[in-house]
Amino acid sequence: MNLRPELVEALRRIGFVTATDVQEHAIPVALEGKDAVVRAKTGTGKTGAFLVPILQNATHEQGIQALIIVPTRELALQVSQVASSLCNHMHYRVATVYGGASINVQIEQLRRGVTIVVGTPGRILDLIERGALHVEKIRFLVLDEADIMLDMGFIDDIDMILSSTPKERQTMLFSATIPEQITGIAKAHMKHDHASVSVGKEEEPTVTTISHAYAQVHGRAKFAALLAYIDQFNPQKAIIFSSTQREADLIHRVMVQRGMNAILIHGGLTQAKREHSLQAFRKGARFMVATNVAARGLDIADVTDVINFDAPDDAYQYIHRVGRSARMGKNGRAFTLVNDEQKGIILEIQIQANVKVRQLHLNLEPYRNVEIPRMEHRRFGGGRPMRGGMQHGGGGRPFRRDGGFHRGGGGGGGGHHHRDEHRGHGDERGQFIRPGSRRRY
């Protein structure tokens, strides 16, 4: 690709030697300075596809040159880690900005001077409005996991951010799927002659190296089915998805009590605990129990199994969950627990994801008497309990603008849900949020 020698050396040092399909197709287009909409399945190397052209064409002039927008804090940290590893060898600086962390620390980081900013939409917009993030000289703008950002209700923030940057910038949009709204963004904010890069068949949104299965169970038998699957199939490294924080806590406690090396991650944990959990999982923990926060773009090597303890809401969510396994051409397994009312989701998955989902008949008898620990409800504010064991507050302003929350007298949406984790159809504790109605705090 005729890259700068120092960039080639930086890539070699972090183990990037051979380009993946998406990198082979997208990087040459981006190196020419063209705007691009890139569709590729999750786990195919999209991060390298936009970082390489940015670093190839960046200069050592002062000021922020690249803004990379991602949907979640975890993905922001992940992209920043790769960018920092490359920039360390090229004398550029990277800043990471997201809600739930000190905005003053991030402002100070920006004040010292950086070349690349990676962040979530809510915090980026806050910093722009405060005058702390100067985007008037941005040369490169990336929307990573664009379909997830739209699903989370960030369309208004994205429009405002894009409108704040120079029209002559180079814009790259990366997504596993290309819904109508993404086409609308491309028409409104990208050059009319932008390139479209599509890798893999659009009718196969999941990688073909994943095998899919489900089991039909009821109530407490879900725990028995989970343990039976683990004993029978012996996953080497697995993510177990729950729809609520409280249930994730229960699953984690059951597994730990049975001597399994399991960690926990969900939006109810502090950012420091979430980062610690991710590090522990990457370094060798066998199981990660998680809510949907972990389904959005995380790149964790060697995940062999994705277990849906709670069935996903739709095929779209299923695709993003199972995409955590079988990364970079490896094999993986996806296993989903459903009850009688949820069997329709299996048919939807087979049609929308174009996969065959076989039914497993597990022997649950050895696990029928598994003890389910009691969990205390967490309380934030003074209102009625929400689904998932949380509480609505009794009134007042529940959220700070920087993505945190006020504990006493909080109202509305419960303590841990903040600006950078809104979803269109429901949050990770089961609270319903009307599509397109994301409130700004």
Image (spheres, rainbow, N blue to C red):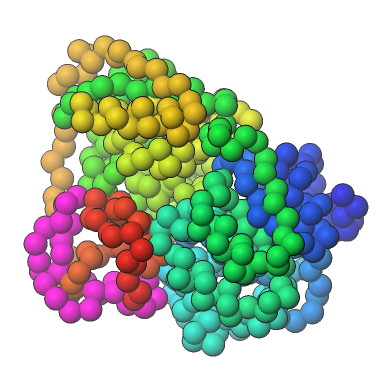
Queried whether the magenta region covers residue 263, the answer comes back as: no
Which of the two residues, 66 or 88, is positioned nearer the viewer here? Answer: 66
Name the side, left or right, on which 400 lies relative to 315: left
Image location of residue 259, percent across then percent down? 32, 29
Image location of residue 170, percent across then percent down? 72, 67
Queried whether the magenta region covers residue 396, the answer comes back as: yes
Write the residue at 16% across / 51% down. 387
Which of the two residues, 317 or 298, is positioned nearer the viewer here? Answer: 317
Which of the two residues, 272 or 430, is positioned nearer the viewer here? Answer: 430
Q: Residue furthest bottom?
A: 131
Image height of 222 relative to 57, above or below = above
Write the residue at 54% across / 46% down. 177
Image height of 65 relative to 263, above or below = below
Name the side, left or right, on which 199 lies relative to 397: right
Where is residue 55, by image quadrant?
bottom right
Magenta highlight: main SS:
loop
Q: Which residues are magenta?
A: 381-408
Image height of 350 relative to 263, above or below = above
Which of the two residues, 53 or 115, is positioned nearer the viewer here? Answer: 53
Where is residue 251, by image quadrant?
top left
Write the residue at 28% across / 60% down. 434
Image location of residue 167, percent across then percent down? 68, 77
